[in-house]
Image (cartoon, rainbow, N blue to C red):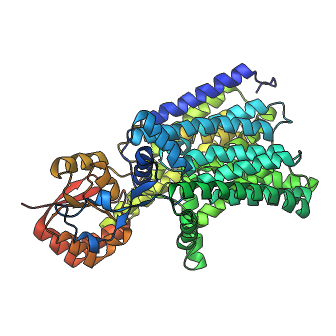
Amino acid sequence: MNGQPLSGRAVVLGLALVTAASLGFASRFLHDPLMADEIYLVIAADHIRHSGRPLTRTKMDATSFASVDPESGPLAGARDTGYALWHPPLYLHLVALVFALAGTGAAQARLFGLGCLVATILAMYLLSQAVFRDRADRRAIGLLAAFLFAVNPLAIQGALVVDIDNTLLTPVLLLALLAAVRSLDTGRSRDLALGALVAVLLWIKLTTPPVLLLALGIFRAAREGIAAALRRTGVVAVVGVAGFLVTWIAYTDAQGLPASAPFQHLVGSLVGAGPGGTLPTVLREAALALARVALWVSPFLLLLWALGLGRRALQFASARTLEPEDLLHLTAALVLVAYLVVGRTTFGFPRYDYPVLPLLAILAAASILDAWRTAAPRYWRGLLATLVGAVLIWLAGDPLLSTYSMVRERLVAGLALGDVIGRVFLQVVVLLLTPLVIASLGGAGGRRLARAAVLPLAVATVSYSLALDAIQARADYLVRYGYGGVGTREVLAFLGREVAPEALILAPAELIHGIGNRASPFPANAVWTSESALVGALSSAPLRAFVYGLPTNTVEQVRFIETDPRVVRVLDEGFRRLIIGSYTVWVRRP
């Protein structure tokens, strides 16, 4: 940053330090209980480890649940199984390999995610060197981008979620973008290599490669013309799709698996998870999802990206030339918009948007160093401003908590949202003031407003990440799926004592799995809002316990259970009630 390029040794040391910092934060959460969809992937990977086939537990409707007899029928864990082929199972096979080496468990599954975190940091650095190959400070860009990503709470917590988008998909997508950037000014041989990477991406997930191909096609059309774009992008698509289909058909034929399963799931997801309702409803849901993403990514990082995007738009309007960084802008925008409309968030966690984060970090790093050269700020003032900003955000409290679980708890209880609104308003004010306070302490980046805002926003981005990392490291509540929920470990311990391994219970799937219960079916979503299904299940003599809670159940489900007259009567007559953190536990009376 002093005008001299960083040495290779400095880069290696810097990457090692930021990686170690990220892994250090993440280690605190390695042994957290599995939640929600994580259990299905762990079960499937364990099946692959032992039998080579991607089998997992399936869900059962409570109408059937009421007639299950754990003493005479087969255990649900052996009976209710199906293929885990929502996506091609490359991720599952790699996790199964980890299980074979280190044993099956939540920590082992998360170790694979942390390995992908390291791979993502390295892939980010390589991609930044290709995108900004003509800049003398490209090594500094790569190192700063790695730092911005490594300390970001979404990067750390996302690597700990047992799923695809936030682990294996992200580094492979970055490598595909690296191949795409390198192919821009070369011949068709690079297109073939990119096609091979697209085939690998399809083996990971079917939805993201089309977004990458769309971004590449649009970029090449604007840069080389429509005909050239169709020809070269078409080669990449044909090689990628053909390579995937040939290997996929061979794999499913050898394993005796249904080859159409992931395609059927893809169609069903697009139809079922797509935008519904009126246009205002769709826009409102997308806006809420964007707010959730912004709080995870850092609103200041999104603003930095917006400034960089605006700068590039103005430059393109005047010069009519595209740069490799524009491909990153386009890919990030397409992925973000696509999942804001279709996928949104999973239990409040934006795992679909995780691959966007390293792209934003790379683009922000380039803008920050541009501003740094003209501002020449002092290091100690920047450090002071970072610490002050982090303290301000930390004192205001966890914005992810107040905008999610606090709201849900009050909606279930029928309480007014006045105190939550006041808390959120205070946090918004603090977030608005933080860059201004930082600017007053550390100076601005130039005379023009846009450039002057870059460095304060950069410092605020780091402050936000460090504050949220500290909050989450000290939190006694869930910080990924079911954000803000408490008592999960305590409920698992209680059920482990009170419920025999082959007793029948009705509870969220992660609790059934967490206590090693193989007799109880996993309830389908419709169970929780069906009076006849719940009453039938609760009236079943073998049923030992009934558990629900906001970490997994929706507000509508909890409200229904606690207000439906027949359900409430059956519970009051045959069960005793306990409140354990965010969970309500009903245990059958002797």
Give the residue at the far left of this rendering.
Answer: 590
Left or right of 571 on screen, residue 119? right
Q: Is 388 on the left-hand or right-hand side of 9?
A: left
Residue 554 location (% of width, % of height): 38, 65
Quarter of the figure with residue 438? top right
Residue 397 or residue 510, whichever sits in front:
510
x and y percentages locating residue 376 in the rendered image: 77, 30
* Figure quadrant of the N terminus: top right
- Viewer-closest of 55 and 95: 55
Question: Quadrant location of the C terminus?
Answer: bottom left
Residue plotted at (80% across, 32% down): 373
Percent position (x, y) of residue 17? Answer: 59, 26
Q: Where residue 551 sits: x, y (%)?
A: 36, 56
Q: Residue at x 73, y 30 (%)?
A: 377
In the picture, measured across the screen, residue 167 lies left or right of residue 214, that is: left
Write the residue at 76% across / 58% down.
237
Q: Residue at x 61, y 41 (%)?
A: 460
Q: Nearer the viewer, residue 122 or 46?
A: 46
User: 537 or 1, which is in the foreground?
Assistant: 537
Q: Quadrant of residue 342?
A: bottom right
Residue 325 visible in the displayed image: no
User: On screen, 92 above or below 417?
Assistant: above
| Residue 510 is at least partly visible in this image | yes
Q: Residue furthest right?
A: 319
Left/right placement of residue 131 relative to residue 318 reads left
Count of numbered badges drawn on the protein: 0
